[in-house]
Amino acid sequence: MENTTTAGVLAPVRTPLNRDQVRGFWAAWFGWTLDGMDSVIYALVLVPALTELLPKSGYAVTPGNIGLAGSVLFALFLVGWGLSFIWGPIADRFGRTKVLAATIFGYALFTGLAALSQNVWELAIFRLLAGVGIGGEWALAGTYVAESWPEDRRKMGAGYLQTGYYTGFFIAAALNFTVGARFGWRAMFLCGLFPVIVSLYTMLKVHEPAKWEVAGKRTVARSPLREIFSAQYRRRTIVNSVLLTVAIIGLWAGAVYEPAAIIFLAKKQGMLQIEAVHMASIGTGILSIGTILGCLALPPLAERMGRKRTLMVYFLGMAVAITLSFGWAFYLPDGLTTFIATLFILGFFGGNFAMFSLWLPEQYETRVRATAFAFNTSVGRFVGAIVNFMLAAAVSSMGTLGIPVAYTALVFVAGIAVIPFALETRGQTLPA
């Protein structure tokens, strides 16, 4: 449908959203926002939490022990994210909104319980279980928005949805600047209980997408997990898993190690602990703003350039940004300000995750869509856990944080080489 503007130029008219589509989007967006907040809370409170809990667990508080314990806990969190693939088949069988609510409730509950940890082992268990819920939210929120929004709006809807995760980064940074700096790391984890409200709202107010209602009546001869490796889907499933692995390694190398890098640089310039925490919060906020803008820019670029070319641009940008920030700015004399400035570039190209919210639903039919989304995102998390141990070993061996993280830029170069094997879906409608 077209409409004539006052200038006499024909412009497309967007299909209006009904009340349920608007309500469902905001439920998914807030769930994804608070998911992002809970994910980055741990990175922001890692040092003070382990400083308190390591002696209670029989370990001395040394930089080496903090680094090792932190890496182990990060890896367990990623394993929890990986285990979240179980939500996909459940959502394909029982519905998007009910399972979405369950994932939000799960990560909120176990993030809040982390505030009660008395040793590193308890914290590890709570973070593992929180990861199972956090990992499932993205797959289900992305699937829900793709299926519930009209065709002419769902692509931009993917970009809007992805801004939520990084708005959560910004909220976590603001909480750390205020609540964390004043009341400590336990209060930060208690803030993670808030998503329970979103979970209850999702369960009570949001209806299932019509596409799933129709697809649910069709009989599937085999399980969705087997179906995504059938001849029809096998290649795209493997390629998507590789591309998401690249993106996730970049996220955890750049975004998660950023607060620790800023705290190190701030203390190097003579700042007190509370001043260093404030600088880490500011840096995370700048990273978040950049990523939100990157998420919003991606859907129009993907429509103009195609999915594959756009992802190539974002992956190349990530490789350059990680090299600049951790390989160059981190080692400058008085490099704190320059390092923080490079985080905006790192954040913008970190918006590559919006591509998967847009692209993955376009490659699978409704009956297996949530399973495919959850599986593809989970594989990268398991690999990310392994890479996290490798990074920890490299940091310990080299005695520096910047260079090991900077080497992860090579992963994006490898990802660019894989993109040509992906399925281009520009101009295609969402499969039924």
Image (cartoon, grey):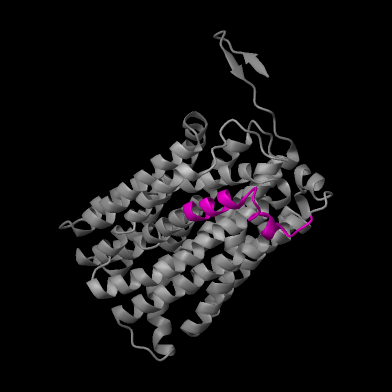
Residue 186 can be seen, yes or no: yes
Left or right, 207 with reference to 37:
right
Is residue 134 part of the magenta span, yes or no?
Answer: no
Looking at the image, which residue is at 39% across and 48% down? Answer: 347
Looking at the image, which residue is at 56% across and 33% down? Answer: 426
Spot the residue most to the left.
333
Q: Nearer the viewer, residue 203 or 367?
A: 367
Left or right, 396 with reference to 314:
left
**Residue 256 x %, y %:** 40, 62
**Residue 423 x %, y %:** 54, 41
Residue 384 occupies quadrant: bottom left
Most common SS among magenta residues: helix
Looking at the image, which residue is at 44% across and 89% down? Answer: 57
**Residue 79 x %, y %:** 52, 70
Residue 100 can be seen, yes or no: no
Q: How many numbered discs?
A: 0
Looking at the image, which residue is at 43% across and 62% down? Answer: 178
399 shown above or below 359: below
Spot the residue most to the top.
8
**Residue 432 x %, y %:** 73, 40
Is residue 227 part of the magenta span, yes or no?
Answer: yes
Residue segment shown in magenta: 221-243
Placement of the N terminus among the 4 image quadrants: top right
Q: Nearer the viewer, residue 428 or 77?
A: 428
